[in-house]
Amino acid sequence: MTTSAATNGGESMISLQQLTKVFPGQAKPAVEGLDMEIPAGEIVVLVGPSGCGKTTTMRLINRLIEPTSGRIILEGEDVTKVNPDKLRRRIGYVIQQIGLFPHQTISDNIATVPRMLGWDEKRIKARVDELLAIVGLDPEAYRGRYPKQLSGGQRQRAGVARALSADPPVMLMDEPFGAIDPITRDRLQNEFLRVQQTIRKTIIFVTHDIDEAIKMGDRIAILREGSQIAQYDTPERILSAPADDFVADFVGAGASLKRLNLSLVRDVEMVQWPTVGIHDSRAAVLAALRASDKGAALVLDDQRRPVRWVSARDLGREDMPLSDVGLPAEAIVQPNATLADALNEMLQSRYGCAIVVDHTGAHLGTVDFATVSAAIQEMRRDARDRSRAEADQLHVADAAGA
């Protein structure tokens, strides 16, 4: 038997009570006596070694796999024995292979569940366009396309839109970004976290990647064989206070670097490098450089989008406009990127910083190695302070019980 972690007072959307699954011919249960409370509006990540039962647990929740025993409580209702098709219409489902119907347009794919629910076509069309916009696909450009006409990342976005189509309170996501290249994967993770800030769905997310779990999860359940919970806690607590050696080994080395997945660029103070307009004179660029301690100025276009890095040496090319001298303005991140994303970008930057832009691409500031170092130190101090506070509370409780 396993026990769930406290939800710190958050309202429970899903309650799993002694949930068990024994497959025919198997000596051990795939899921054994699982108790778990999943708070409303949070992303709960199930992570663990291959074969531990995390995907089976997810499929038990929407009864793609029927439980052997135990109960599934959804929004206070026991749904263990209700019609499974009706249950699944209340739960969005996104899988690694996406599962779009190849012979249907993206619009028809997204409209599948609303049509099953009897929505009128005007409402369905409005919902399709709304969701395409939410996941970053222009409705005019994409609603009439077929899955084969989309990139892998675009198909994944369409799959998320389809899962959201009937506005379900719960979403299940089974390694949704696992089959995508690393760059697209980071972007989709960031985009999904941005969307989640608005939609606030209750999400059960399965991954084998602890770094993805730390980045995506409000809470993480690290599972042993049989879906036994080794630790169910916030990413911060799992990194700073692993419950046992199994958890510590699973998290692995480099906890300080992993903590960078817990902080977003928008949460730290940005560094201001000198900026100039693309039509400014060389004298204006030199003046900006002399007024700062930086080695280059960032050239912005008329929409304040970064174009080039220009140093004093670059200005010697009198025959070339500012848009052509210096180095391209690369290593660009948005405010909802993690500090880990920013660090990865700045490692590739000539000037050791990442440029921060808003959703239109307009310049907001930069983050550099000093920013990242300060964030790590702050997280370490917070972890030490929490550990001391908890030790003090245990000491007081022990003294009171003596």
Image (cartoon, rainbow, N blue to C red):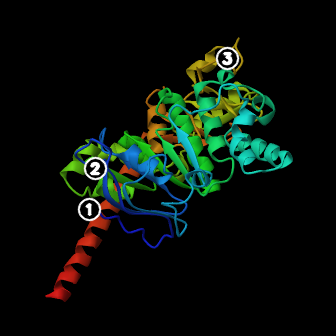
Q: Amino acid at mark 1?
A: Met
How far apart in space, not on screen, are marks 2 and 1 (Cα)? 12 Å
Residue that protrudes farthest toward the front in the picture: 24
Q: Residue at x 51, y 70 (%)?
A: 11
Residue pointed to by mark 1: 1
Residue 101 in which image quadrant:
top right
Residue that protrudes farthest toward the right in the picture: 122
Badge number at residue 289:
none
Identify which residue, 90 or 311, lies in the foreground.
90
Q: Amino acid at mark 3?
A: Asp
Residue pointed to by mark 2: 29
Image coords of residue 248 (percent x, y) = 23, 49
Side of 230 relative to 167 (left or right): left
Identify which residue, 280 or 180, lies in the foreground.
180
Residue pointed to by mark 3: 324
Q: Residue at x 49, y 70 (%)?
A: 10
